[in-house]
Amino acid sequence: MPDIDIETPIGKVVIPFNEEMVLELFRKINKVQAGAENTLEDNEYLEFLEANDLEDLDEEWLFWEDTKVPVMLHDFNNWLPLHFDITTKAYMNRGEKITNITHQKFDYPHGKEKFPTRCSYFLTHKETGAKYVWRVSPLDGVHIESCLYTNMNDESTNLDDVKSSLSDFVKTQGILKNNVFDAKYQFLKKPTTTFDDVVLSDEQTEILQRNIVKYIKNLSFYEERGLPTSRGALIVGPPGTGKTLTCEAIINELEATIIYITAEDIYEQGTIENLYKLANGLSPSVVIVEDIDTLGGLDRRETGNHPLLGEFLNCLNGVERNEGVITIATTNYPEHLDKALTRAGRFDVKLDFGLPDDKLRTHILEKYLSSHKTDEKINLKEIVKRTEGFSGAFLKEIVTLATIEAFEENGYNSETKIMQKHLNSALESLIKNRDDYIIQKGSQSTPNQLYG
């Protein structure tokens, strides 16, 4: 978590957040409470763990942040039965009474599932017979506080091994595998966009298929031959030229783990490294970095040596193994990226999604019109001529607005046809809106920037 900033009458006060300090505070509180008379919960823990006193218990505290709670609870409850025989209980009144276990429903890509959020798990390892108690309870309504206990005098137990086993499960075979999610472990809906929805040149299609789609589908083939199983593709171009749509089509095409990163997700150093470790464990994976130029600190000419840049460089092609991971980054401003970031070995392929020429603008308009009924007399030559320097997104908006006008004019009759006058009217309206925006804002923006 980042530091906590508090505005006061005398200025901003920054309180450094340190998870270890918080954990230590809880440990001290527990030790103070241990001096008091044992509760029912204490005694049942001691009896199960075959310990004489609370001082004999070893403990490890873990906090699952709010955004990660659904993932952690899902994987935790699916991992436990693989290794342990389980009995569950819940306590109330500071451990004085047994109560019902509290559950909560969470949304997952496959549907809703219900898991305990206040519960003590009494665990006996299926192979070693080692005994543990793992307690989970809600903290501030959004976080989960969990604590793993064992008898420190029992040589068959090992808290680190238990924690590592859960961590490995989450990173290799948990609910995140083959799903789409962001840097905060929030699931994203898989897009329905296909390559039929994206206007690409034959060359662009071939590059994407060879370096991303077919590459990740044949990773085992490359691995058997000692070839790299990581790859990087940088997609550049002005807003509205199809970069995001292309990424959506790739996501829809692949059966792989997809991690979608935006600037707002990278809130502290170490996030990028952790995400790539996760991607490696859940491979085959695709890491998509949207608008990589907005992340900040990625050009040493402006920022000097920045830890975020070093982290990216190392993850893309450094000392860390990055097998089975394809990185796709998009940018509107490739000139803002450090040269070390864009060299081969980090981003092996660069696709330039420039503004469409006359031929491509004609093709884009025809493509968007093909899903509607149109008048046979439509002539696109004048519209193509007047939209030089406009993006594909702007052209799509012309067709959308023309369709709206046509249906309004004809009382939303399903047999309505788009006519030349509707396209001309839509173009005039959009150009006027653009010109009014530039006058009002004093903007120097180009059409593709306004409608990207």
Image (cartoon, helix red, strand yellow):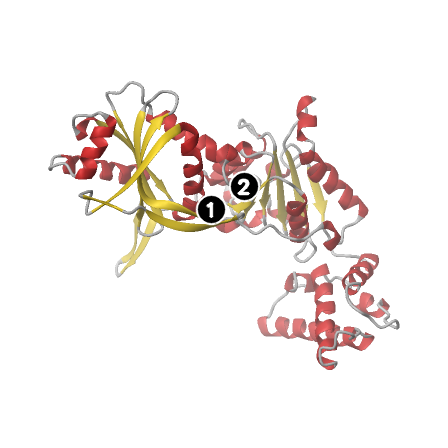
Q: Position of residue 130 (x, y in %)?
A: 32, 23
Query: Of callouts 2 and 1, which one flags the residue occurring earlier in the amino acid sequence?
Result: 1
Residue at 14% from the left image edge and 36% from the top image edge? 38
SS state under label 2: helix
Q: Which mark is residue 367?
A: none
Most foreground residue, 248 or 3: 248
The residue that label 1 is drawn on is 184
Amino acid residing under circle 2: Arg
The residue that label 2 is drawn on is 300
Most foreground residue, 191 or 20: 191
- Disc 2 crowd rating (10 Å Cα; few below 14, some 14-19, many 20+) is some
Q: Nearer the viewer, mark 2 or mark 1?
A: 1
SS state under label 1: loop
In the displayed structure image, the side of residue 149 where residue 357 appears, left or right:
right
Most foreground residue, 21 or 169: 169
Task: Please say if 451 is above or below 13.
Answer: below
Residue at 69% from the left image edge and 75% from the top image edge? 432
Q: Which quarter of the rendered picture does the C terminus lie within?
A: bottom right
Task: Please say if 183 is above or below 284.
Answer: below
In the displayed structure image, the side of residue 149 where residue 70 appears, left or right:
right
- Disc 1 crowd rating (10 Å Cα; few below 14, some 14-19, many 20+) is some
Residue at 65% from the left image edge and 50% from the top image edge? 248
